[in-house]
Amino acid sequence: MRHFDLRLLAASSLVLVGLAHAARRPQYGGTLHVAIASTPSSLDPAALGQLDAVTCRNLSSLLFDTLVTMDDFGRIRPALALNWQAHPGNQRWQFRLRPGVAFDDGSLLTPGAVAASLRAGNPNWTIYALDDSIAIELNSPDPSLAAELTLPKNSIVKRLPGKVSGTGPFRVSDWQPAKKLVVAASEDYWGGRPFVNSVEITLGTSARDQMMLRELGKADLIEIAPEQARRTAMEGRRVSESAALELVALVFTHQQPSPEDQKLLDALALSVDRASIKNVLLQGGGDPAGGILPNWITGYEFLFSTEFNMVAAQQRRAEVPYAPAWTLSCDPADSLSRLIAERLALKAKDAGMTIRPISTGIGDLRLVRTSLVSVNPRVALTQVTAALGLPPPGLSGDNLEELYKSESALLESHRIIPLFHLPVNYGLSPAVKNWGEKRTGAWDLGEVWLGTEKP
Amino acid sequence: MFNLLGRFSRFVLSLLLLSFLLGPAARASDWSDPEQQLAQKITAITGPGAVSLDLVNRSSLSQADIDGIRSTLRNQLSAAGLTLVNPDQAAATVQVSLSENLQSYVWVARIQQGTNQPAIEIVSVPRVEPGTPLREPAVLLIRKIQLWSQEDPILDVAVIDSSPPHVIVLDPNKIAMHALEDGQWQLEQAFQVPHSRPWPRDLRGRLVLRKDHLVDAYLPGIFCSSAPGAALNLSCRESDDPWPLASEQVTLNGFFSPTRNFFTGALAPGIGQERTVPPFYSAAPIPREKYVLWVLTGIDGQVREVDGVNVQTLSRPGWGSDMASTKTSCGSGSQVLVSSNSDGATPDTVRAYEFPDREPVPVSQPVELGGRITSLWTESSGSTAVVVSRNWETGKYEAFRLTIACGQ
């Protein structure tokens, strides 16, 4: 009975997945058709950062590699770096590069090119190009540097005027910004030529159109909203589900909540009926969140309360004589966020507060959705606070107790009320083989192959 | 004969020892360090006095482990001067939660003293690898003995019946020989496998033990061979030499694509008149009185039976791509182990089949692996096979020897 939770996690994903992989060996050839909603205007991973973290990583991984990668168990694995070493104190790290790797323009991957790429995204690092390796010196110790290097922003990119070049498994064959991206298998990819010949990605496709393309057999891979996943799977369609890694939260936009604000935010947190939102709005998907990071990443999230207690909420509210009306903003294009915002406002009213959802501008409160792109808790917490404009967690060690204290301090600052952790879902055609379910929702399209089943 | 039996017994004992050493998860885990740490942290906060202790499991630990941890924690706290009492009599309440994350067990103590903010203490312990359940089938039995486990992909494993026992492990980077010394596997030799072009995905490779030298290793476009003698003194070269398709007893070789994951279909010397067949992933011989029937799993999903005169196509949607033949003293004396074409919701399996005529007949229950099968080869002896699968829970690659035993 070991690893019960993880097995449940795997099983819950795989039940929905259907034909995730089989003992049939992969076949080469074919074009994988993908439709997504995002509309990137550049392929540079630095610019892709404007997209949500999961899409950014998935698009970036087609064309670019990082020095190291992280597997589904949080272990660091070699990629463009064959091996690495942290000097005592974790302030200087050295990475030995894989020899013989080439960018898609034919030039060789050199320590100088790697150093230049990393310097662009990390101005605070001092990076040395050595004979066959690079050394990174940091201002302060960072035991998680290797995990940080797995982030898409640290992809190794050769930037030329008007063009970016990578070492990834695919090469660009057609790029129409915000409309269409076609990539072809790189025959000489150091990790082995991808099984499919090409991937054609239609950008800016609405959820409805994605579903239609899938139904017509014109898309093999589409995005599915968390609240649609269960129904889609029950209709017999193939759905892939990651672990719950997208944080839905309320962020208080004022920098320093006053003592009165804190009491009102306590009351608001107690008035959130997560169970009801999960059942009704999320159609049973996602996990109620008390912490910023989910329990499967930290192991301690259960310590943070998700209690719904309207009486306690009303009592806390009553401690403040005058409660201002707060506005609550969310992404107007995101129907799920709008519905959750309305539900929160309704319950807050029961607690004696006035929360007014708005569709434009930034409110006193923001309903945010942000994906955790790393399963390393330290990197994930740093990344999510940066994405939400919260103060950095200020971690120095690699210790779970310190992480807990940092996360507790963030929650006690009253700047954020976690609501849910949602999975990332994809709809897959029966022809997609070896999908390789990932907890992080990451694509590994180099490993995917196309079977002969007709959709 | 006695010598042979002696060798066989020693070999079986070695394998059992090997299995024992590689399957530590079957034994009770040692939690003494984290138990002691947590007890010390709790005591440092409460000091001596009356406390209540409640333990909640939020992890995948077994009930036996949980009971053991609870008992030891109670003893350690008592030994540190705490008196364990009911909550209504306690000066402090301690709730210990046994949780977990991806890499660790996370034990959390929540200590409440009066109306103060509760104190939180955390101890983390690296996770222990799980064991793999063994399912007992009927009719013929497929026995599964774990040979090796590692994070890097395993392409093949060869077991050398020597004293001490040795295993050779082929992975994408190296060929490594390990010896069992004082109950521990020690790396004796490791050779990098040179290759000028990237390996294809779904990389395959095969080890074949030889009589006149230790071992040959076949990889796409690369052939490695050891020098005469018992040492693993290897030399590798780029080569399109065909790979042996079965054991040394049945000589048929197939050319393997240097940039793909399948045999091209070109055979040496051929099956009767047939010098080429459609490209295939694996092949298994079934000896007949006057000829050998070959069963091939094609890359088109078809299973083909080739006898040198006719090629017959079977549709076996439940079959995977990998097969391995075994010669045994059970049933017809020749079985083919076939991987499943699983639906991804369940781990892959291997099942034994016999071919009384041309129709395959299952003769064992499927034996379950811990995840997706990545390799299945007949061992050099011809009587057993090595299967490699990637464990879903740990992500590690695990190699098992599959042996067919006669049923009751």
Image (cartoon, coloured by chain):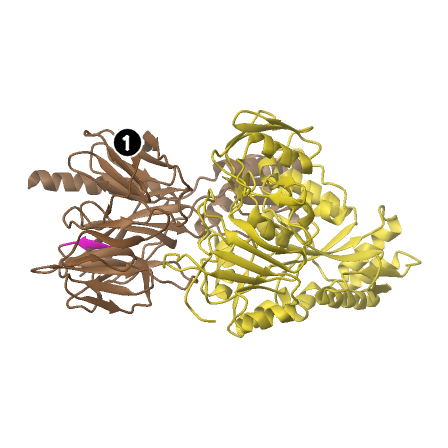
Q: Quadrant of residue A23?
A: bottom left
Shown in brown, the chain is: B
Q: Which residues are magenta?
A: B323-328
Residue A326 versus residue B105 in the image, above or below: below
Residue B324 versus residue B345 in the image, above or below: above
Mark 1 residue element: strand
Q: Quadrant of residue A70?
A: top right
Shown in yellow, the chain is: A
Residue A237 versus residue B121 in the image, above or below: below
Inspect this view and state whether residue B204 appears: yes
How far across and how far down the image is residue A181, in percent? Answer: 60, 57
Q: Is residue A135 left or right of residue B339?
A: right
Q: Which residue is mark 1?
A: B235
Q: B104 or A62, which lies in front?
A: A62
How far across and how far down the image is residue B382, in percent? Answer: 18, 49
Magenta: main secondary structure equals: strand
Q: Quadrant of residue A120?
A: top right
The crowd level at tag 1 (other Cα within 10 Å; few <14, some 14-19, many 20+) is: some
Q: A179 or A289, which lies in front?
A: A179
How far across and how far down the image is residue B171, in percent? Answer: 36, 40
Q: Is residue B381 left or right of residue A255?
A: left
In magenta stretch: residue A319: no
Q: A44 or A249, which lies in front?
A: A44
